Image: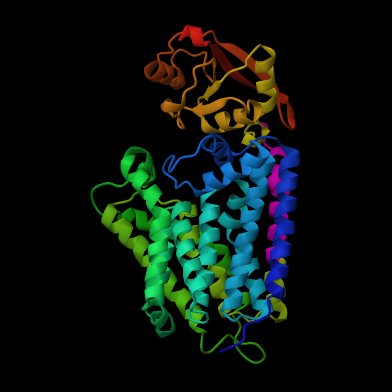
Amino acid sequence: MTALPKRSTTLAIAAAALVYFALNALSLGLVTPTAEWDHAEQLILSQFPALGYNSQPPLYTWLVQALFAVTGPSLPALLALKTLLLTLLVAGVAAAARELGLSPARQWIAVLGLALIPQIVWEDQRNFTHTVLAVVVAAWTLVAVLRLPRRPDWPTYLALGLLLGLGALSKYNFGFFALGLLAAAATLPAWRRVMLSWRFAAALAMAAAVFAPHALWALSAPSAAGEGFDKLQMSAGIGWGTLLDLASGLGAMLGVLLLVSPLLLRRGRGGGTDRAPRPGCRLLWRAAGVVLALAVALILVSGARDIKEHWLQPMLFYAPLLLACHAAPGGRGGRVFVALALVVLVAVSVALPGQALWADPQRPSRLNAPYRALAADMRAAGARPELVLADSDPLAGNLRLAFPDAVVMSARSFFPERLPAGDWLVVGERLAAADASFRRWLADNLGLAELAVQRAEAPLHHLPAQTMTLDWALVPASGR
């Protein structure tokens, strides 16, 4: 059995990632008290336990609920959770590189390659939630699969089964990654031997058991659970045009990494690429091929018309590992690659708080929105609601931070069975306009046709010359 590299490099990589992501979260939290869209959604959904909420699986929301049980609704808590998950992602990629038998230098290449995938280094820190969790679980699922031929014992099988189940609870497109990885593994003798085992069947049964409660909920609530498939804009006919969207998404996700990869793929004396790729590297190549084939098949069969770049993250996050498999990290090319990755990491660290600090006055960031000050204005006017109902998720989620004792909902995230009996606070950007879509929604769904609308106003964070206004109205229990 080939000895693996020592764990010291993997631990050093994880520690460096933790410091990096923690500093970014700290700078973002110091610059603005406002939650981005996905975090705002979690502030709404995490108010109550459920087997499902909307078109996304519930695992991220369950994690937030567990965290808020200790901290209460808190933006710093959400940023801390994101920091932990991103650290686990980097640690998972490093651990996978170690399982592949890659040298410490190549392990660093694998994790620094993540910095050259814009959706991971930028969007995952800026906003995404479910996608981040799905990629984290995918990374550790890959570690378990790579470890299986070397350690085909019960802990490895059970860890694999648990990870497969948690991945399905993280984001549905995790299934593409899992199916592609296992199908590719079945084509290689070392993995086929360990998959033809009743322990592997037990692992699959465990995965099914973990996912089953949510699956039953999805079957009982098809309109809510099926919203994610509606986003694909499936229609009759073959989605030929969407194949171009898929190619565009692949280019956006992997284009930078592909452009710089020649720096590391030198051949010749003193550090050429491997002539005989490791079995684990062959597994990754085959998994990538199967995953892409599955994506193409889905597009052609379903007629899907809308493919988002970030949906590809759980399927292809391991592209830097493929580069590391064949990299010659020494020499000038390796130094240039590392320098480019570090420049990107520093630029992202500056740009994250810069969204609010240096926002375009004509197009301010959501992070400039002064929701806390606006809520204070409402409280000063006597608002002490049991329900806050807003016209959007970002508004509703941020108002939960200001009204932590109230139930908070939005027109999109609306749960009529949980409406409280006390006073309601209705908030919207155009609530005073009789023709506003939110006013029509309130009238059609709650019978609230007449509202005594007031207005709150506050300067934007870091743009004090500009203000934001919100319309709001108190609806007393006696008036409904």
Q: Nearer the viewer, residue 376 or 338?
A: 376
Taking the view exactly as shown, the residue that stands out farthest to the left is: 236
Instruction: Tell me which secondary structure the magenta stretch mostly adopts.
Output: helix
Q: Give residue 397's position: percent from left, percent from top.
A: 57, 32
What residue do we see at 40% from left, 72% from top?
Answer: 200
Asked whether residue 360 is drawn in magenta, I would say yes
Residue 58 position within the rendered picture, expressed as x and y whole percent measured from the top left: 47, 46
Q: Quadrant of residue 66?
A: top right
Name the colour scheme: rainbow
Residue appearing at x 37%, y 38% in the figure: 224
Of 399 and 415, which appears nearest the observer?
415
Q: Is residue 262 visible?
A: no
Q: Is residue 283 above or below residue 298?
A: below
> Which is more toward the observer, 358 or 225?
225
Determine the residue located farthest toward the bottom in the rendered image: 269
Queried whether the magenta region covers residue 257, the answer comes back as no
Q: In the rendering, at what x and y percent does residue 118 appear?
A: 58, 56
- In the picture, the quarter occupied by the C terminus is top left
Quarter-of-image position of residue 347: bottom right
Q: Is residue 193 above or below residue 32?
A: below
Report the span colored magenta.
340-361
Question: Residue 449: horizontal and vertical position, in percent?
Answer: 43, 11
The residue located at (53%, 44%) in the rendering is 61
Q: Using residue 395 as the reference point, say whether residue 7 is left or right of it.
A: right
In terms of depth relative to the viewer, which is nearer, 221 or 253? 221
Is 444 displayed left or right of 454 in the figure?
left
Q: Is residue 265 left or right of residue 22?
A: left
Task: Using residue 111 as the reference point, say whether residue 145 is left or right of it.
Answer: left
In the depicted structure, whether residue 422 falls above or below residue 266: above
Q: Residue at x 57, y 66 (%)?
A: 257
